[in-house]
Amino acid sequence: MKKLVLTFCLVLSIFSFGQHQDKVDFTKAKIYLSPLPKEKKIQGGVIYRFNVLQNVDSVFFDAKNMDFSKVELDGEKVDFNPTEKTISIKHKFKKGASHKLFLEYVAKPKQTVYFIGWDDELEGNEQTLPAGKQVWTQGQGKYTSHWVPSFDDMEEKVEFDLTIEADKKYQVIANGKLLLKTDNEEEDAIWIFDMEKPMSSYLLAFAIGNYDKQVLKSNSGVTIENYYYPSDSLKVEPTYRYTKKIFDFLENEIGIAYPWQEYKQVPVHDFLYAGMENTSATFFSDAYVIDSTSFIDRNYVNINAHELAHQWFGNLVTEKNSEHHWLHEGFATYYAYLAEKEIFGDDHFYWKLYETAKTLDNISEKGEGESLLNPKASSLTFYEKGAWALAVLKDKIGEENFKIGIRNYLNTYKFQNVTVAEFITEMEETSNYDLSNFKAIWLDGDGFPMDAAKDYLMKNSASLRMYYVLKHDDENSFDSPEILKDSELATELKLELLQQKGNFPELDLLPLITIEDIRIRQFSAQKMGVIPEGLKEYAEPLLLDDSYITNELMLYNLWSSFDYDRSVYLEKTKNIVGLPNMNVRLLWLTLALFTPDYNPTQQTYYHNELVGYTSAIYNPEVRQTAFQYLFEISALNDEAYINLIKATNHHSWQFRNYARRLFDTLWTDEEQKKEIEKVANQLNSSDLRYLKTKLK
């Protein structure tokens, strides 16, 4: 901690404009961190600068599970009152005064900071898996106060600078521009990051890990740093494909320069979501680090564009509270779709809107629709209905008015908090349109206005006009093979017509298998099921098609349909791993275990490998699939039981819930229950939290 205290004095600088709630305006914060990964603690200090707007007898910070060793106001010790959730500083603060407050602490974060790979049993995993050891944060909404005394309220905007001490063999990435990394003979280095503008504290972030980086420059001169694990160098291009194009497009389309000094993207292991738009430093799941073959099946493009759009919508201009969440997620979703339109074309854009409209309409028909102003609305509402609202708004007031309105809105409220009403007022004043009817239908209304959405799609998309005409006027056109052969028609239209068709007799599948369009071949693989002998020679080439989803489907379909050739299919696909979730490899191992005449001396090895994928060094998608296959073939062993027990406490709620459901199923079987109780003796108390609830 001594090195960090010295750095306090070296990097203090002039504080800048900020905002605050009530009677005190916090303007600048300098944060100093020394993470202790093996102890899962954060040793830190922070200096806050603030101005007193009205007389007040205390200030407070949100601070979860922190022990404070020093609290000083303007260099003097001051009384403070810590609780499990906050710290209050008692003092007679006079209107017009400015102060410097120093807090030194140790945090024991129960969430928000994730120490990945530092457990004793995972030592050495840097040689086992590309991610290696990591520390990363996820402050979604209001949780940064688990690692630094800060503000759970989004309305408190402060200019934050971060100084982080860490083992110099790792890279440290955080908000803002890296000003300095010390280079000395000691094991630890100090990284100093500077932010020039204020932001909400939930957008604070840092990551520590083993990374290299690709550096790009936008047309406007902004530095873009794309991080990757050193062993993933061949995946950099497909993972970050179109990044510069997305950045340049959004700057041009939004009409406001990127508001921060530089931009970074960082894949992290076991991330809770697809991505998070930390100011100037997007973190995303390494499950989206892909090779070129994966690009057709699952790529990072939409997440890339969505999180970048948040740098304006959410970070530059921030909602006052969750009632206005549309101003974040609806806008980021819409602008991400526009970026994809620029990359993949109009059909991709309008058919994506059509798909989300169908989903929203189905929910609305069930009486489960939600207003965009409902603070408890679902992500589907905020993201997809929100994107639709903006598409319709632009159509209503015209593209030029829309763009001018967006620029005025961002300029008026930059580095501030805003409401939906203020956005609507800005758009009305710019366009000279009365938007009360738009607001009533698209924002206030619970239902999804499908007729209006259909009119919008038919007006703007030739292929959707054709679809609606075919659907309404000529049901037989759905069966016409000429539609599939027409290279001028959108693949999305063909796929929708095929979906409408339903079941596919053998002869109808044949033209789909041999068509040049890879997405239609993938559709045919999904429709096959048991393959008749007459289709065998046409279906077999799909086993090695340029799609890992098709590979997986066809491996299972062919293996199931032709037992005399099972070993042939396994041999052909033995080196295919698949998507980052290892979809092909996990299926391959399962089928190999059920093919006793295929490499019989390797059966134990195959079983051990499949069990190994339940380990914490793999991402939750891999682990969940491995658990599921092992359960289905009754091949769980002691190692798998141990990994499952630990998974019931995982920080990702989706994976944790799956693990608990599987555990509950096993617990009802007396034999499995005995095995679980036996291996439980090898685990520590914290691993057994969920199991103990069963024993009670």
Image (tube, rainbow, N blue to C red):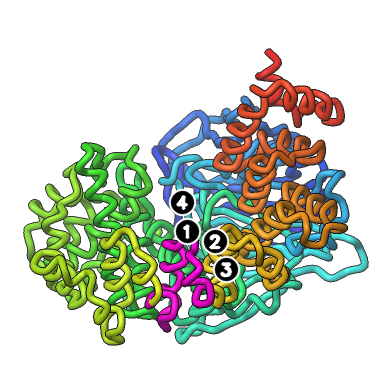
Secondary element at tag 2? helix
What type is the residue that disc 4 sits on?
Lys
Give the distance between the C-alpha atoms of the residues marked 1 and 2, in whole angstroms.
6 Å
* Residue underneath mark 2: 557
* Badge nearest the viewer, 2 or 3: 2
* Residue underneath mark 3: 551
Contact check, label 4 and label 1, Cβ < 8 Å: no
* Badge nearest the viewer, 3 or 1: 1
Secondary element at tag 3? helix
Q: Residues within 10 Å of mark 3 (few under 14, many from 20)?
A: many
* Badge nearest the viewer, 4 or 1: 1
* Residue underneath mark 4: 157
* Badge nearest the viewer, 4 or 2: 2
Contact check, label 2 and label 3, Cβ < 8 Å: no
Residue 529 badge = 1
Contact check, label 1 and label 2, Cβ < 8 Å: yes
Specify start and end residues of the magenta stretch as a single range. Answer: 511-539
Contact check, label 4 and label 3, Cβ < 8 Å: no
Give the distance between the C-alpha atoms of the residues marked 3 and 1, in whole angstroms.
14 Å
- Quick one: 442 or 259, which is closer to the camera? 442
- Quick one: 507 or 256, which is closer to the camera? 507
Report which quarter residue 284 is drawn in. Answer: bottom right
Q: Earlier in the sequence, mark 4 or mark 2?
A: 4
